[in-house]
Image (cartoon, rainbow, N blue to C red):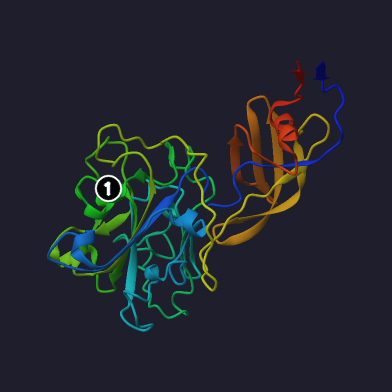
């Protein structure tokens, strides 16, 4: 006996293709997050020399977020009130280091500072400022002074592309935990290149700060940003330091390190942010199309995409061909906010066979029974 299905006529059905998982934080990898405070000024800034330290592996996957709100994070150990208990003192300034090595990293600080870290305005000394070359912005932890303090990534941060710096690389630097926490080669790569946020006393001046430079890797790959000098006088000005990095590959100081590791499409977690906390979250909009034979290309109605701590309307353009599925999200002003290509996609609302059709086209089969 022979059962045979040539698949010449399929019932009408609808599938939903999502280019990336809807849970698990930033797509294609994960970021780790550290805080260092109560550090010993006579020694280098490392895990062992800071009385206050916390590290969370896979922070975005663990809490299903795309960043950290340091005023109300999913893990309260990262709350700025730990190193700064008072809302009135001390007053402080902010330095960002290794900004060009993590060009997708975005900061939202107070009511006036927001954007990719490497684009933010700095004072002549290197502190964050409201205007390019303007006076250093001085904060206290009072909400009127510091209404927001957020680090956030786009959902595509681990993809390799030109983020506007003229260099193709991952949007967050890849390295490993041990090299970050040991700050093994600070002259060549501060915190092994991790995106670094330094909270420093307001009395910190130009003599305590240096442009973040590197003699390692290649001359045309400067890390960008500013940080405290690595000496006792400057280290005494540090109130707290946060670091973020893509936990992938090798230490930046190791042979074989690459600025653009392969995306890990299997990564992701199913965690959630604890109730009452307020880390930034992100989710891809889903295009709903389909019919006999599988998915079709097209542009959907308006959807919503959470990016940089805000929610904006977007149009979702889905293109399906033999190489995979591409989903482009464009906001109402015509700016592309996300462009992601998936080789398979995630097919829902279909049984296994229909799922295969959606990915591969029509599927015929033959069964021989003896």
Mark 1: few, some, or many residues within 10 Å (few <14, many ≥20)? many
In the image: residue 171, left or right of residue 235: right
In the image: residue 171, left or right of residue 95: right
Q: Residue furthest front?
A: 370
Q: Quadrant of the N terminus?
A: top right
Q: Is residue 5 visible?
A: no
- Residue 168 place in picture, x, y as percent: 44, 35
Q: Is residue 357 above or below residue 189?
A: above
- Residue 148 place in picture, x, y as percent: 48, 70
Q: Is residue 32 visible?
A: yes
List the residue tagged with mark 1: 192
Marks counted in the figure total 1
Residue drawn 42% across the image and 51% down it: 31
Nearest the viewer among 17 and 259 is 17
Q: Is residue 20 above or below residue 369?
A: below
Residue drawn 79% across the image and 37% down it: 290
In the image: residue 313, left or right of residue 58: right
Question: In which quarter of the view is residue 6 placed?
Answer: top right
Nearest the viewer among 231 and 358 is 358
- Residue 200 place in picture, x, y as percent: 28, 69
Element under label 1?
helix
Q: Quadrant of the C terminus?
A: top right
């Amino acid at each position: 006996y022979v059962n045979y299905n040539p698949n010449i006529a399929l019932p009408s059905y609808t599938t939903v293709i999502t280019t990336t998982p809807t849970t698990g934080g930033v797509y294609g990898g994960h970021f780790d997050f550290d805080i260092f405070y109560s550090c010993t000024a006579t020694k280098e800034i490392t895990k062992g020399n800071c009385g206050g330290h916390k590290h969370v592996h896979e922070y975005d996957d663990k809490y299903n977020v795309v960043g950290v709100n340091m005023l109300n994070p999913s893990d309260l150990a990262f709350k700025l009130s730990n190193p700064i208990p008072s809302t009135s003192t001390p007053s402080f300034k902010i330095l960002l280091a290794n900004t060009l090595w993590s060009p997708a990293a975005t900061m939202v600080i107070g009511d006036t500072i927001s954007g990719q870290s490497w684009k933010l305005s700095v004072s002549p000394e290197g502190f964050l400022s409201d205007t390019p070359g303007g006076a250093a912005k001085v904060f206290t932890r009072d909400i009127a002074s510091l209404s927001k303090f957020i680090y956030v990534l786009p959902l595509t941060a681990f993809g390799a592309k030109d983020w506007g710096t003229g260099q193709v690389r991952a949007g967050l630097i890849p390295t490993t935990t041990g090299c970050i926490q040991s700050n093994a080669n600070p002259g060549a790569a501060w915190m092994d290149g991790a995106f670094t946020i330094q909270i420093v006393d307001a009395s910190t001046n130009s003599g305590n700060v240096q442009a973040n430079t590197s003699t390692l890797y290649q001359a045309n790959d400067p890390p960008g940003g500013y940080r405290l000098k690595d000496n006792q006088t400057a280290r005494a000005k540090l109130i707290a330091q946060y670091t973020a990095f893509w936990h992938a590959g090798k230490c930046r100081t190791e042979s074989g390190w690459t600025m653009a590791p392969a995306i890990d499409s299997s990564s992701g977690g199913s965690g959630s942010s604890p109730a009452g906390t307020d880390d930034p979250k992100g989710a891809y909009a889903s295009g709903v199309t389909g019919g006999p034979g599988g998915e079709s290309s097209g542009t959907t109605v308006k959807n919503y995409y959470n990016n940089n701590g805000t929610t904006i309307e977007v149009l979702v353009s889905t293109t399906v061909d033999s190489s995979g599925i591409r989903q482009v999200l464009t906001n109402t002003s015509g700016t592309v906010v996300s462009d992601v290509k998936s080789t398979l996609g995630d097919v829902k609302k279909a049984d296994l066979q229909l799922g295969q059709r959606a990915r591969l086209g029509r599927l015929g089969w033959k069964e021989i029974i003896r």
